Amino acid sequence: MMSRRNTLFSVLGLSALTATLTSVVAGLRGPAGASAPGQSPQARSYAFTQTPAEWKQRLKPEAYYVLRQAGTERPGSSPLNREKRTGVFSCAGCALPLFPSATKFESGTGWPSFWQPVAGAVVEDTDTTLLMKRTEVLCGQCGGHLGHVFNDGPPPTRLRYCINGAALTFTVA
């Protein structure tokens, strides 16, 4: 039979475990969770930085959620998913050119997909937030979360950069 003391210790133990797991997951990646091996995400520096308040003022709410909080937009919700014109897809946070339209392809996933970024425009980090290992893609200039890269894309790279449209802007060439 469980006493009140045992019940109390069980509840406190579960609360402590939940708090610990929450902080471990938060520590695995922050809003700009990229890090070099052995380097904490907070230690990586980016050329373009803003305070959280400045980011909120600069970005639309959905772009803030994706870029700064590592969120994901609903599949099929971005007009950029249907963009077919010649141009450049850039970071919605800092305007860095990220993907030329010539590398965009229809992946059927509901998000804009590309087989190659502009050289040096993105950085990658390991993302384990969904209890699986994925490769997160971040803007190389501001550290904003863009999406993920997978190895099931078309030639010549066989990569699929699955990018949130809310993290991008498009400029016609």
Image (cartoon, rainbow, N blue to C red):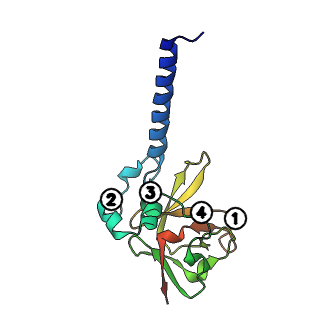
Rate crowding at label 2 as few (under 14), some (14 to 19) or many (20 or more) other CA atoms within 10 Å: few
How far apart in space, not on screen, are marks 4 and 1 (Cα)? 9 Å
Q: Can you identify the residue that label 2 sits on?
A: 52
- Looking at the picture, does residue 2 appear above or below residue 148? above
Give the amino acid type for the residue marked by disc 2 in the picture: Pro
Q: Earlier in the sequence, mark 4 or mark 2?
A: 2
Disc 3 marks a residue whose amino acid type is Gln
Where 1 sits versus 77, above or below?
A: above
Q: Residue at x 45, y 45 (%)?
A: 26
The picture places residue 118, in percent across and down from the top left corner, at: 51, 75
Q: Residues within 10 Å of mark 3 (few under 14, many from 20)?
A: some
Is residue 47 visible to the viewer in this orientation of the structure? no
Mark in front: 3 vs 4: 3
Q: Residue at x 60, y 50 (%)?
A: 133
Kindly identify which residue carries mark 4.
149
| Residue at mark 3 | 69
C-alpha distance separating marks 4 and 2: 26 Å
Numbered disc 2: secondary structure = helix
Label 4 secondary element: strand
User: What is the C-alpha distance between the residues marked 3 and 2?
Assistant: 10 Å
x then y, percent, for residue 31: 42, 55
- Near-viewer residue (151 or 84): 84
Q: Which mark is residue 152?
A: 1
Going by the numbered disc 4, the residue's amino acid type is Val
The residue tagged with tag 1: helix, strand or loop? Answer: loop
Asked if the residue at tag 4 contacts the one at tag 3, i.e. Cβ–Cβ closer than 8 Å, the answer is: no
